[in-house]
């Protein structure tokens, strides 16, 4: 059963390799991309079912037992996130079928997308901290090329900033890994959790923890380390933005969640207070940045930053309720942001412009499309009964229980301002009459435009379903949060595997 | 030896960060290259330096005799070197393409994706003329009269 763990990595790898070999055959490439993403989704879902029933799964790569070899571990959080990676990947591949031009396809767009998905799945599943670095590099190099593919002016500028910033973060990560190994002589996360409490030099451990925090903070775009994100995310084709928005920053948040619940819990009063304060600053600065912008995808890019703050806030609280809320929030955020960026993609298909001033009249042209936008948008702002409301509710309750009233106020203000930001998009793009005076031709739902509409419809539907069926969904998230808070099951699964 | 390497690593990091803070893209890339190497050297050094005792197991035994070099940092560095090399190669090609498209080697001319108000592309794209403007990395001569306008 534990061999299942390798599939979310191997399936996209082989489909990517095959797609690269079949470079000239667009049809085969498209099918392979769908198969690869679907493979991750299905194995992820099976993993969730297995892990929910039988506890964390461990695969020892090459048969080397835990502290010596590299292990792949799936606890509930990893399994849920792998499933979502497959889901977001599937939506993105389907949307790409309708929107990506043949030039990009010819230069290996689909293999790159699959490699990106492989890197993300690998990062979610690995139980070794150096291996985590390797997966980060895999997903980064794929994202670098995806970002620059097409060579438009804005893309090159954005890519350069993105690359430089992420490489600096990677080096910081690597330095921290090296120092950590030198101090305790192991890199398996579960083993680190075992030996770190007895480390000779707790001060040095806190310093190393701070280095990890900065490195992952850059990758997760936590304020004040966020500047690269709004400069880069709006430049590639909308579907690429959607994948980045849905997956990449969440990998950074996942790494923070994993390391600061499993490994670095020696000095919670110091590290987790920094995380909590940073989360509040992230929320406010992000949403204020969004309000200052006048282009759709730039607004959404700043909203990504703002809502990273919510996910990180749960970690800063470091209570079971807070962590559960964080898990639910990450899930909800991945779905909502992917949906919103895909919707900008549909708008971009009709009017190739991002500027609010040049857009308008979409509600008159296609009322149901307006509703489709409102569902994820209002969920992002936290309007009941959509899933975003319950995610925020869980986090707010957790912070009230923990007595952190400052962060409650910050989160509530951010929600109101988020509502303002998304209603601005609504009133400018959908409600306002088209400034050019022409009537828009939004593509109707037909057999041909299914790849355009279906991903958005499914994702928006999920927002509603997760809101209405919040009970079972939140029970799963709570179980994942509890596993994070008390990692003994994770540790014994990794270190005490029966052979 | 460790002390010498420590100073060397510190020096490399200093130079790397200095270069990363420059506006010229070429220097930023040099900074990234130095940063990679400084990091590799750091892992190598903190892993512990042992002289001339490779971690090899003599035939017929199950563990190496005497003190031996830890193979782990070496494998980490090997991986990091390969990744760093690949990423650096990509970054150089990216900078080259950027230079072709944006016609500038100056980060300050690449603010179109950051600016709130859309910048006229023409304003940014005017070719870089060393005769007219001083190079951004030229040292500022003290006492030089400020340019007006």
Image: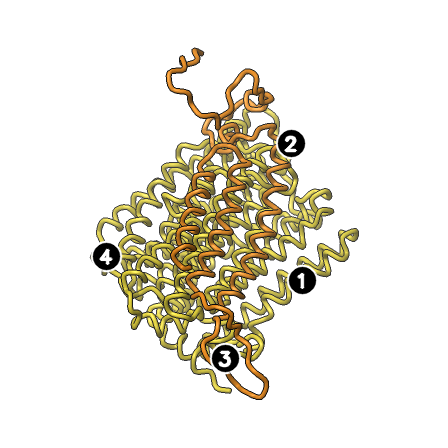
Q: Is residue A432 above or below residue A199?
A: above
Q: CA distance from mark 2 to mark 1?
A: 37 Å
> Looking at the rendering, in which quadrant would you find the N terminus of chain A?
bottom right
Choose the circle earlier in sequence order: 1 or 3.
1
Q: Which mark is residue A400?
A: 4
- Residue B58 rendering spot, x and y as whole percentages: 56, 82
Q: Nearer the viewer, residue A78 or B62?
A: B62
Q: In what element is the residue under mark 2?
A: helix
* Disc 2 versus disc 1: nearer the observer: 2
User: Residue drawn 40% across and 79% down?
Assistant: A492
For mark 1, what is the residue?
A35
Q: Nearer the viewer, residue A202 or A234?
A: A202
Q: Which mark is residue A413?
A: none
The chain drawn in yellow is A
For mark 2, what is the residue?
B100
User: Residue drawn 48% across and 71% down?
Assistant: B69
Marked residue chain, label 1? A
Q: Is residue A14 above or below residue A95?
A: below
Q: CA distance from mark 4 to mark 3?
A: 43 Å
Marked residue chain, label 4? A
Q: Which mark is residue A65?
A: 3
Q: CA distance from mark 2 to mark 4?
A: 55 Å
Q: How many numbered callouts?
A: 4
Q: In what element is the residue under mark 4?
A: helix
User: Residue drawn 46% across and 57% down?
Assistant: A174
């Amino acid at each position: 059963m534990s061999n299942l763990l390798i599939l979310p990595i191997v399936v996209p790898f082989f489909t990517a390799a095959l797609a690269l070999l079949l470079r000239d055959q667009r049809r085969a490439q498209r099918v392979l991309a769908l198969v690869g993403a679907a493979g991750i989704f299905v194995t992820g879902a099976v993993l969730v079912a297995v892990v929910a029933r039988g506890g964390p799964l461990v695969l020892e790569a090459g048969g080397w037992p835990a502290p010596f070899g590299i292990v792949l571990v799936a606890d509930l959080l990893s399994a849920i996130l792998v499933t979502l990676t497959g889901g977001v990947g599937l939506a993105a591949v389907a949307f790409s079928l309708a929107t990506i031009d043949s030039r990009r396809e010819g230069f290996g767009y689909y293999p790159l997308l699959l490699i990106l998905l492989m890197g993300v799945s690998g990062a979610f599943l690995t139980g070794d901290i150096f291996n985590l670095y390797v997966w980060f590099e895999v997903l980064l190099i794929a994202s670098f090329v995806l970002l620059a593919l097409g060579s438009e002016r804005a893309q090159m500028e954005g890519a350069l900033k993105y690359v430089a910033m992420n490489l600096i973060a990677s080096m910081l990560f690597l330095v921290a890994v090296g120092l950590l190994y030198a101090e305790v002589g192991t890199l398996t996360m579960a083993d680190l959790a075992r030996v770190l409490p007895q480390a000779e030099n707790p001060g040095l451990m806190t310093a190393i923890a701070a280095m990890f925090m900065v490195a992952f903070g850059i990758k997760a775009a936590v304020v004040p380390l966020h500047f690269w994100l709004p400069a880069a995310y709006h430049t590639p084709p909308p579907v690429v933005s959607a994948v980045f928005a849905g997956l990449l920053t969440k990998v950074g948040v996942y790494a923070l969640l994993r390391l600061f619940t499993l490994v670095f819990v020696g000095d919670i009063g110091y590290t987790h207070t920094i995380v909590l304060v940073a989360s509040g600053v992230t929320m406010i600065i992000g949403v204020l940045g969004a309000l200052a912008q006048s282009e759709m995808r730039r607004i959404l890019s700043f909203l990504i930053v703002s809502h990273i703050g919510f996910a990180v806030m749960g970690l800063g609280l470091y209570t079971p309720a807070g962590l559960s809320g964080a898990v639910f929030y990450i899930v909800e955020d991945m779905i909502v942001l992917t949906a919103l960026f895909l919707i900008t993609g549909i708008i971009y298909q009709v009017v190739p412009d991002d500027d609010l001033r040049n857009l308008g009249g979409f509600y008159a042209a296609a009322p149901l499309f307006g509703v489709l936008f409102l569902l994820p948008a209002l969920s992002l702002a936290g309007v009941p009964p959509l899933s975003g409301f319950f995610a925020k509710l869980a986090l707010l309750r957790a912070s009230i229980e923990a007595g952190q009233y400052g962060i409650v106020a910050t989160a509530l203000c951010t929600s109101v301002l988020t509502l303002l930001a998304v209603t601005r998009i609504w009133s400018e793009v959908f409600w306002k009459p088209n400034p050019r005076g022409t009537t828009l031709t939004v593509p109707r739902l037909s057999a041909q435009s299914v790849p355009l509409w279906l991903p958005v419809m499914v994702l928006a539907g999920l927002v509603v379903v997760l809101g209405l069926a919040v009970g079972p969904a939140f029970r799963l998230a709570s179980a994942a949060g509890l596993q994070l808070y008390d990692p003994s099951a994770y540790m014994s699964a990794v270190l005490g595997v029966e052979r | 030896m460790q002390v010498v390497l420590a100073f060397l690593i510190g020096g490399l990091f200093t130079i790397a960060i200095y270069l990363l803070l420059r506006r010229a893209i070429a220097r930023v890339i040099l900074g990234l290259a130095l940063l990679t190497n400084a990091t590799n050297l750091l892992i190598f050094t903190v892993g512990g330096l042992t002289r001339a005792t490779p971690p090899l197991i003599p035939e017929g035994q199950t563990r190496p005799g005497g003190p031996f070099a830890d193979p782990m940092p070496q494998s980490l560095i090997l991986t990091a070197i390969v990744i760093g090399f690949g990423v650096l190669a990509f970054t150089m090609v990216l900078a080259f393409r950027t230079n072709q498209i944006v016609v500038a080697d100056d980060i300050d001319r690449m603010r179109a994706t950051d600016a709130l108000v859309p910048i006229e592309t023409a304003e940014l794209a005017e070719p870089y003329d060393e005769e007219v403007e001083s190079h951004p990395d030229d040292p500022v001569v003290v006492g030089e009269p400020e340019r007006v306008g």
